[in-house]
Image: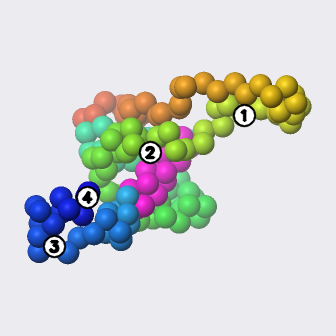
Amino acid sequence: MLEQLLRKKCSKSGLKSDPNISSKIHVWKKTYACITDILVRSGFGWNKTTQMTVVLDEVFHSYVKIGPFAKTLSFKSFPYYLAWTEIFGKDRATGERTEDIYNASNNVSNETFLVSPEYHVPSSYTNIFGDDHECSTL
């Protein structure tokens, strides 16, 4: 259906759902996951005005050692981050509903699985380091 709409609106583009759209969604998802991981770590913040992460250079360089993809996100604005939260937020494990081995085995043996319809979706991040007009780091 997407390809039909693309042909109709952009007949000479040659765009297809696979690989063009699929690869774009893959990159968005990977970027969202990296930003989300960054924002839960100490020393990182979010500036709502610029739609960028805020961090000291040495903290960022330390993080890049464990998450090399973050290097590609440096000094970039992410105006779609909140939309990505709506789209991809439910796809990320948060550890919120974890249980120890004893409770897990009891649930399996009793065939009782408690599933909540609520999922953890990160709320829109407020600027951790001050108001939107002044961004200071730690």
Residue placed under numbered mark 4 in the picture: 2
Q: Residue 13 carries which label?
A: 3
Q: Badge 3: few (under 14), some or many (20 or more) residues near its Cα, within 10 Å? A: few
Residue at (26% x, 57% y) in the render: 1
Residue at (50% x, 39% y) in the render: 90
Q: Name the foreground residue: 92 vs 11.
A: 11
* Distance of label 3 from label 1 (alpha carbons): 47 Å
* Distance of label 4 from label 3 (alpha carbons): 13 Å
Is disc 3 placed on a helix, strand or loop?
loop
Residue 99 percent coordinates (x, y) = 77, 32
* Distance of label 2 from label 4 (alpha carbons): 20 Å
Kind of residue sitting beneath label 4? Leu
Is disc 1 placed on a helix, strand or loop?
loop
Residue at (64% x, 32% y) in the render: 96
* Distance of label 1 from label 4 (alpha carbons): 38 Å
Kind of residue sitting beneath label 1? Thr
Kind of residue sitting beneath label 3? Ser
Q: Can residue 54 be seen in this view?
A: no
Is 31 left or right of 5, judged from the image as shown? right
Image vertical order of residue 5 relative to residue 52, above or below: below
Residue at (36% x, 71% y) in the render: 19
Range shown magenta:
26-41
Residue placed under numbered mark 2 in the picture: 88
- Asked if the residue at tag 4 contacts the one at tag 1, i.e. Cβ–Cβ closer than 8 Å, the answer is no
Q: Badge 4: few (under 14), some or many (20 or more) residues near its Cα, within 10 Å? A: few
Residue 71 percent coordinates (x, y) = 45, 64
Say which label, 1 or 2, has the lower sequence index.
2
